[in-house]
Image (tube, helix red, strand yellow):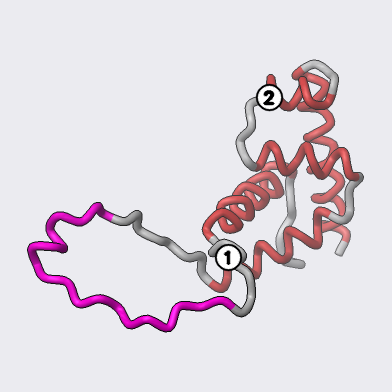
Amino acid sequence: MADRTWTADDVADHFEEAFRTLRKLPPVMAQGYFNAWPEMARTRHEIAFMKPEPMVIRPSASAITRLELTFDWILWIEEAERKLVWRRAARVPWKLISHQHGCDRTTAWRHWQLALTKIAARLNAQ
């Protein structure tokens, strides 16, 4: 990362990728509970009439590593800025973000840009 010059757009893209990676991770389940039953043998006729299950896509190891780096970066900004950056990474519309922060859309965008610039400046300083 030392040979790269970071911009606010690069940091925003990184946060969006981190959000997508976090959504792909399996859900957290209670420890100690598991299923010991074997898989049922189904006939072709039964399989043909089953509801299709959604395809599960798991993130790669490098995507999880970048997610962990992003979690380190989020500690460099204030809590209100964290919420703003994370909501924008989740592609929440600016109208909802500005309503939640109690300001207009342009001010929310400026705060978002400032938070991303703080992270980019700290990454460029390393």
Residue 82 on image: x %, y %:
82, 44
45 or 99, nearer to the observer: 45
Q: Residue furthest left?
A: 45
Q: Residue at x 61, y 65 (%)?
A: 28
96 to 10, vertically: above or below: above
Please tell me which residue is depicted at 78% across the width and 37% down the height of the picture. Answer: 84
* Quarter of the figure with residue 30: bottom right
Spatial CA distance of label 1 from label 2 is 27 Å
| Vertical placement of residue 89 versus 75, above or below | above
What x and y, as percent, mark residue 110?
A: 81, 27
What secondary structure characterizes most of the magenta part? loop
Please name whichever residue, 87 or 4, is drawn nearer the observer in this view of the structure: 87
- Magenta-highlighted residues: 33-52
Q: As drawn, is 79 to the left or to the right of 5?
A: right
Query: Disc 2 marks which residue?
Result: 94
- Residue at 84 percent across and 19 percent down: it is 103
Residue 62 falls inside the magenta stretch: no
Q: Tell me the element at label 1.
A: helix
Instruction: Give me the disc on residue 63.
Output: 1
Residue 31 image point, x, y percent: 64, 76
| Amino acid beneath label 1 | Ala
| Vertical arrangement, residue 43 with respect to residue 14, above or below | below
Image quarter where the N terminus lies is bottom right
